[in-house]
Amino acid sequence: MNKSYQLIIVGGGPAGLTAGLYAARSRLHTLLLEKAGFGGQITNAEDVDNFPGFPQGINGMELGDLIHKQATKYGLETALAEVKGIEVGDGRKLVRTSEGDFEAKAVIIAGGSEFAKLGVPGEAEYTGKGVSYCATCDGAFFRDQAVAVIGGGNAAVTEAIFLTKFASRVVLIHRRDHLRATKVIQEKAQANPKIEFILSSVVEAIEGDTLVRRLRLRNLKTKQQSTLDVSGVFVFVGLKPNTDYLISTVKLDDDGHIAVNQNMETSVPGIFAAGDIRRDSIKQAIAAAGDGAIAAVSAERYLEG
Amino acid sequence: MSKPETVDDKNFDSVVISAKTPVLVDFWATWCSPCRMVAPIVDELAEEYTGKVSFAKVNVDENRKLSEKYEIRSIPTLLVFKDGKPVKQIVGLRSKGDLKKALDEALAAKK
Ligand SMILES: Cc1cc2nc3c(=O)[nH]c(=O)nc-3n(C[C@H](O)[C@H](O)[C@H](O)COP(=O)(O)OP(=O)(O)OC[C@H]3O[C@@H](n4cnc5c(N)ncnc54)[C@H](O)[C@@H]3O)c2cc1C
């Protein structure tokens, strides 16, 4: 016999934990499975200034902890396990994990996304040796050194600003001729004397000895190649939804996001998706939390129905 | 009950370098969220690998010399030491299954 629940939630980020909060308060027999650690990606943010209720802003780790605490306060059961597959049969869903199989009538998938890779020579080789995907974790290793940040969205520009706390020089490299980040964030970066911008340019290779030493760049407009001496490269070129194991379970869009309707229902009755992992998500913590609430309410209706 | 031992610049040699068994060293810092997430997994591994592998933790903030020496540029970094030498490096937050696999590979590798 598999351990059986009414509802299983995959992922312990803002979306999954909020779904868990609602489900537990509705007294649904619920299990939340998380592969790595509770709180999700928001815990990597130094300051979260756009989550309502915190007018002074709040540290991401702290926010993750608070959401986790609130979710488990009402008796939400959680476990550390990686979900490897979801099989659908007879209205029940079999959830296969690294720690064994579980069964539930309804499932909410809230697995978020991981950082996309640049896919250039040197990236894999120098990961942990100068190539990083987390500025709050690794910024301090680059005191008084020059670093590059790759990307032009909110994460890239915010992290570039954060890195000026440590680095002597932060060069932001973006493939387009303008940034995509929210205007207030852009303005803050432009006003920072430590930040320089190299636009319309891509990284062609990351080079060094045992550690990163330089980047090879190419300007997409002039086609000119150049090198840039840096000891760190922080990559924020978008997100890849964690849906590889779901390809044959639910309908995905071309980028791998889960297709949902406004009730967070997927192509399979009784399977819901919430947060960054779903199609058309704005990839913000407050929206992920909102999705989680909707998914939990929809799951409850499904279970009653 | 085996728990990871906190080591620093001073006792690193005696605890890690001259150890008879392989040692997994977790380089971490308080400000690093994925480090906090990997910690309970490392605790569980310490339990499961009792006798086979010993476990240690280095706070990079308080022990800059060690992180310089081993060229740590990203945390969490887990380094597996065998006979005093780093033989395997695992960077970033991984699931328990991935960590076990990496650790088993390091243990199976020839000296
Ligand atoms: C550096 C940075 C700064 C940010 N700053 C802000 C900000 O200021 N404001 C804001 O609103 N948003 C910010 N965001 C975005 C915000 O973090 C995300 O929108 C939000 O975390 C999405 O929540 P989620 O629950 O959908 O996914 P996630 O937070 O990604 O959580 C998903 C969870 O599911 C787990 N998981 C995945 N697959 C499996 C599996 N197979 N089995 C078990 N568990 C699994 C993951 O380990 C993860 O913990 C920032 C993001 C980053 C990276």
Image (cartoon, rainbow, N blue to C red):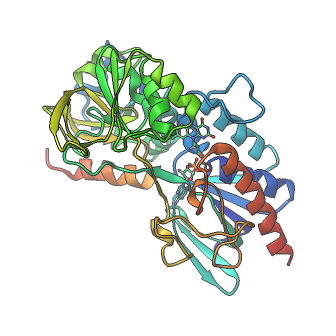
Q: If the image is split into quadrants, where does the N terminus of chain A sit?
A: bottom right
**Residue at x 68% of width, y 26% of height:** A57
**Residue at x 14% of width, y 44% of height:** B111
Residue B12, given in percent of the width and then of the height, sits at 30, 20
Compare residues A204 and A265 and report the one nearer the observer: A204
Compare residues A91 and B48 and report the one nearer the observer: A91
Residue A127, given in percent of the width and then of the height, sits at 29, 40
With A73 as the anchor, is A99 left or right in this view? left
**Residue at x 70% of width, y 83% of height:** A91
Query: Residue lying farthest bottom?
Result: A90
Asked if one can make out residue B23 in the rendered structure from this viewpoint, the answer is no
With A234 as the anchor, is A293 left or right in this view? right
Residue A123, given in percent of the width and then of the height, sits at 25, 44
To which quarter of the image does residue A305 belong?
bottom right
**Residue at x 36% of width, y 41% of height:** B51
How many numbered marks does the figure carry? 0
With A117 as the anchor, is B43 left or right in this view? right
